[in-house]
Amino acid sequence: MADIRATITTCCGGAGGREVTGRTVFVCLVAFFAIVAVANGMMMTAAITTFGGVETVSSYQAGLAFARETSAVHEQDRLGWQVAVRTPTGAGRTSVIEIVARDRASEPLAALEISGRLSHPMDKRADRVLAWREVASGVFRADTGQAVGQWDLAIQLSQDGSAKFRSRNRLTLR
């Protein structure tokens, strides 16, 4: 037995090294798994707190909605509306989004209701509904506040209570 201890001591620490005992091995083993458990706990906490949520609850219902959207796109194309999205810089760091809507003959569209929202591409919790105001016939503006970075803008133009135009655009706000 004395020969084995001498070999372990010499192997691990040389002539002046410490003796490796069962207690030392146990403490090192427990410390290793404690570090692994703490790292896993930190990773789980980060994953749970940054999860924005499920996008689609039912893929079947999403497929039906896609079919409805396809027919709405064909109706929208028949109208021939020209809708432009602009992002002129406002005062300070506040961004402004401007929508200009014209008909097939490039005349401003009147009697429109507009709804729109900014969606963050990575975090659904950052999404926000925009308050639109008509500044001229067929021209609408909304302040985005401190929204900086890439966003998806979803707009819907309605006339006489029915949706006529829908659009989704990727914007970079500064």
Image (cartoon, rainbow, N blue to C red):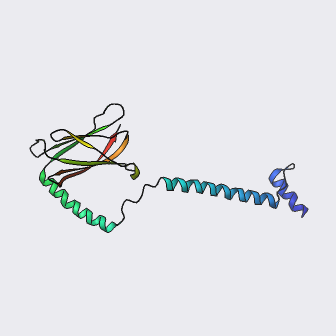
Q: Residue at x 10, y 46 (%)?
A: 104
Q: Is residue 46 left or right of residue 80?
A: right
Q: Is residue 84 left or right of residue 118?
A: left
Q: In the rendered image, which quarter contains the N terminus?
A: bottom right
Q: Is residue 80 left or right of residue 44?
A: left
The quarter of the displayed image where residue 28 is located: bottom right
Q: Is residue 42 left or right of residue 101?
A: right
Q: Residue at x 66, y 54 (%)?
A: 35
Q: In the rendered image, which quarter contains the C terminus?
A: top left
Q: Position of residue 173 (x, y in %)?
A: 34, 39
Asked if 83 appears above or below 93 in the picture, the reply is: below
Extreme residue toward the bottom, this view = 60
Asked if 38 appears above or below 108 in the picture, the reply is: below
Q: Position of residue 140 (x, y in %)?
A: 22, 41
Q: Residue at x 26, y 62 (%)?
A: 66
The quarter of the displayed image where residue 134 is located: top left
Extreme residue toward the top, this view = 91
Q: Position of residue 72 (x, y in %)?
A: 19, 58
Looking at the image, which is closer to me, 116 or 80?
Answer: 116
Looking at the image, which is closer to me, 86 or 97?
Answer: 97
The quarter of the displayed image where residue 82 is located: top left
Q: Residue at x 13, y 41 (%)?
A: 108
Looking at the image, which is closer to me, 142 or 123?
Answer: 142
